[in-house]
Amino acid sequence: MAWTWRFETADGTEVQPAVEPEEFTTQGDAESWLGEVWKDLLEGGAEQVVLSEDGTKVYGPMSLRADG
């Protein structure tokens, strides 16, 4: 299983992340990584993220903004 993030602008357009992610083996690892780097991602132009497992969307889009 591979858990991956998609990084998007507020309108859903995919963007390159400011911090290059890896493929994660668990949902918890993916979410922990996001918790560590979300501010850098936001500053780099990503407004929201989508989590997928083996190419299947699990949830999102989820805003990276605290008020989102």
Image: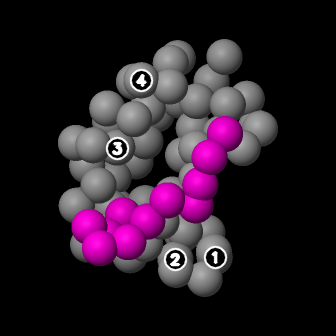
Q: CA distance from mark 4 to mark 1?
A: 25 Å
Color encoding of the figure: one colour
Crowd band around label 1 with a 10 angstrom C-alpha radius: few (<14), some (14–19), many (20+): few
Left or right for 8, reference 35: right
Q: Residue 29 at what x, y percent from top left? A: 39, 24
Q: Are marks 4 and 1 in contact (CB under 8 Å)?
A: no
Measured Cα–Cα span from mark 3 to mark 2: 16 Å
Amino acid type, mark 4: Gly
Whichever of callouts 3 and 1 sits on the residue coming sooner in the sequence is 1
- Which residue is tagged 3? 34
Q: Residue furthest front?
A: 67
Tag 2 and tag 1, C-beta contact below 8 Å: yes
What range of the chain is rendered magenta? 58-68
Contact (Cβ within 8 Å) of mark 3 with mark 1 = no
CA separation in Å, label 4 and label 2: 24 Å
Judged from the image, the secondary structure of the residue bearing numbered disc 2 is: loop
Compare marks 4 and 2 and give the one earlier in the sequence: 2
Which residue, given by chain and number where applicable, does mark 2 sit on?
Answer: 9
x and y percentages locating residue 21 in the rendered image: 43, 42
Residue at (63, 74) in percent of width and height: 12
Q: Which residue is mark 1?
A: 13
In space, the residues marked 3 and 1 are separated at their CA atoms by: 19 Å
Q: Secondary structure at mark 3?
A: helix
Assess disc 4: are there few (<14), some (14-19) or many (≥20) residues with their C-alpha within 10 Å of its C-alpha.
few
Read off the residue under disc 4: 28
Closer mark to the observer between disc 4 and disc 2: 4
